Image (cartoon, rainbow, N blue to C red):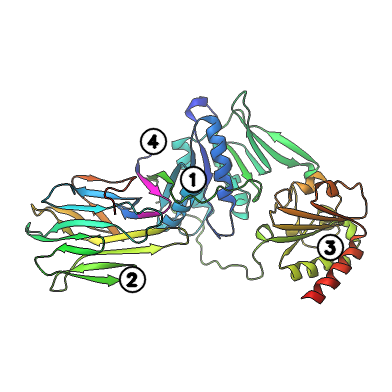
Amino acid sequence: MLKFRESLVSSHHNYVLNQMLTPGFVVGNPDLKEGFFFLADVVQPGESGSRIYCRIYDSQGNFVLEAEPDRIVTNPLGCLRQPLSGGYRMVLPSGEPLLSVQTESFANGSLTRIQGKLYDRAGKLRMEPHFDAVLVHGESVLWLKDPFRKR
Amino acid sequence: MKMKQNSTWQGVWVFGDYRNYFQNRVTLQLIAKGRLLARHLGTEVTVLLLGSEIHQYAMEYTAHGADVIMAVDHPALKTYQVETYVRVVSQLVQNFRPEIFLAGATAFGREFFPRLAKRLNTGLSADCVALEIDPENRLLIQTTPAFGGELLADIVTPEHRPQMATVHPGVFVERVHDHQATARILYPEVDLQAEERVQLIRSRPDQTRKGGLENAEVVVVGGKGMGSKENFQMLFELAQLLGGDVGATRPVILSGWTEESRLLGQTGKSVKPKLLITAGTSGAVQFTTGIQGAETIIAINRDPHAPILKMADLGLVGDARTVLSLVLEKLKKRL
């Protein structure tokens, strides 16, 4: 039998993760008040763009920022959120890129690609660039059928 | 492939031919039919998708009713090459063992599917106009025109698997796009390393071809009752005024009045226009099979007992050339 990888695909919007499509995914635990998480939440019909929530750290385990889909909510280092074609990117004050999120629209749906090298509070690598999207490591749910958080 | 145990072959597969996606709807039509067949068999419909950067099509096929997408996304598959595709797909079929495998009877399907059937050592019914499951033995009944379209033959493949068929565009109706749909998506690890004997240097579209008769919203069809090749040209004039295209019956093709690519019916194309006008066609079953999806049919025939007048929404009894001359005159004045 051939080996295969399995995921879920939505007809409306997907993210590219580990070279697969997925309507949404979670790395880490978004319900905890502290610690790393990255939630690429399900985008429902009628919504556009992406729905990214995250709390990220640097490779030394120092807190960098916490963000919601439209803004950075906790920002001790003064990181910037800059618009990109079809999305945005977040950069350190030095200009060093942290994360980019870009959504490509088709006739009947859309696809979001995420790029970034993200670490947890222990300084462990949890997400890294992989081809034109990301690869994730550690505790994760690779596909969500329904939204994790309500708008 | 000789079947050893019936139960080891399960599922309905549809080959995802996404070239000219928004015009070529046959894959979507086959997903809809495949889903019905799969439900009848208590299984799933899977769309097999080969290519590079195929995410958009995986989403479209999900929206149109696929239960499962089998995706092989690799730069080596970006351009269709028959040897590669046959090798990859035969690997997948031998591993996943679908009991039914369908493809559109397009130029692509007509080249690719016979080679695949040969590689898999199974049968193939080409240009099917109907597909049903035999409730007694779960076999796929594949209905295909035979003897130049004079007969319809019901074919089954009792011993070999998968049961393979190509189907005319327009025979089945696609499901409505569902923005809420989800499907499982599988990414099999296939061997793409083999060297091919044929190398593609370049390809380019044929600039002489237009949007296609199958997708025209207005179709004007002429039969032998048009009388001559010169009279047949009136149909092109009418089609141009109405923004449509021209189809023909087999006797017209045999007389050399127009090219074979315009043939409608069991051995030709199937159309589903909003408006179809027939002129000088009697309504033989091998022709009407190709027009039964038309929303409105207007038929012109001098014989009041012609079968086409029974099928038409509006029938005009009269000489097709005379009626068409009057229609053209009126239309030209109005436009």
Instruction: Name the residue located 37 percent from the left edge and 58 percent from the top edge.
Output: A47
Instruction: Name the residue located 21 percent from the left edge and 49 percent from the top edge.
Output: A27
Please provide the residue range marked out in magenta: A7-14
Instruction: Name the residue located 38 percent from the left edge and 63 percent from the top edge.
Output: A104
A79 magenta-colored: no
Q: Which residue is mark 4?
A: A1
Most common secondary structure along the magenta stretch: strand
Using a 10 Å C-alpha cutoff, classify the residue at mark 3 as few (fewer than 14 neighbours), some (14 to 19) or many (20 or more): some
Q: What amino acid type is highlighted by mark number 4?
A: Met
Instruction: Name the residue located 76 percent from the left edge and 71 percent from the top edge.
Output: B241
Local SS, label 2: loop
Q: Is residue B81 above or below residue B286?
A: below
In front: B70, or B81?
B70
Q: Does residue B290 appear to the left or right of B83 in the view shown?
A: right
- Please provide percent x and percent y for residue B268: 73, 52
- Please provide percent x and percent y for residue B258: 80, 63
Q: Which residue is mark 3?
A: B257
Contact check, label 4 and label 2, Cβ < 8 Å: no
- Please provide percent x and percent y for residue A143: 31, 46
Gap between marks 1 and 3, in whole Å?
A: 40 Å
Gap between marks 3 and 4, in whole Å?
A: 54 Å
